[in-house]
Image (cartoon, grey):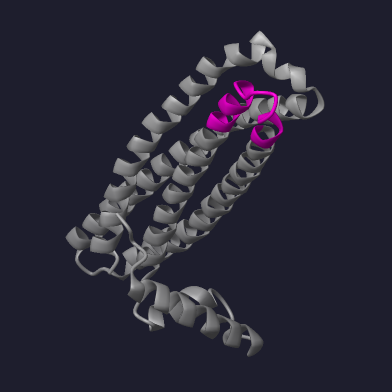
Amino acid sequence: MIVASERLQRAWRWGMCVVLLGLIAGCQSSPYYASMERLGVSRGEVLAERVDAARQAQQRAREALDSALSRLELALSASPSTFSREREALTQALEKSDDAQRDLAWRLDDADEAAEAVFTEWHDELDDYHDERYRELSERQLAESRERYADIRQALATSREQMRPLTETLNDTALLLEHEEKARDLAALGDRMPEMRDTLDELATRAAQIDRETDALVEALLDVRE
């Protein structure tokens, strides 16, 4: 599910302009969200977009790791005439993987900031209800959304942590290959490949779970918080 519609993207661009103007003028307290809401984009929509962006960042990071692992396999099996080229391709793939994982970390922080704003505002609004039944309904929806977000956040964080040792192994291997060409023939390097592939398979399984949970949260946020 792609949440970032053209309307939301246009509103985001205009919202950033309003934020900058507001900051210059000394505007106080959550100028970004206030400006987005004036443009018809709720905080729930912002959170939905950021959660979806974090989900996509996790997918890109996983795919980048998979590409780097494939490049390692090619380097280990390369002929002497193509080894240097394959080794350089591995280095570039690892750089892209590192960039993707840094982007994932940034997206998670971005989603956390939006979640704090959305859930705080939602909780504060509970006291505005006159009908206790409506208040209880909203409170229950808030609790469910909080729990869903916490589950997604934990799943994404765990996925990121699983990438760390695999990334370290790939970086160590690339460094070894950079300084010792014959290292490509070491049996120990090839022996690690199944283990690293298993880690990527676990990441793919986790990604499928994250997709389901993200879709459910995004749908709930867009339905309830519009």
- Does the magenta segment cover residue 163? no
User: Going 71% across and 33% down the picture, which residue do you hit?
Assistant: 84
Nearer to me, 143 or 47: 47
Q: In which quarter of the view is residue 172 placed?
A: top right
Residue 80 among magenta residues: yes
Q: Which residues are magenta?
A: 69-86
Q: Nearer the viewer, residue 10 or 186?
A: 186
State whether the magenta stretch is mostly helix, strand or loop: helix
Left or right: 44 as drawn, with respect to 32: left
Instruction: Estimate the x, y position of residue 71 in percent, counting from the top left.
Output: 58, 32
Residue 44 in sight here: yes
Q: Quadrant of the C terminus?
A: bottom left
21 in relation to 204, above or below: below
Q: Position of residue 80 (x, y in %)?
A: 70, 24
Residue that appears at 48% across and 55% down: 111
Image quadrant for the N terminus? Answer: bottom left
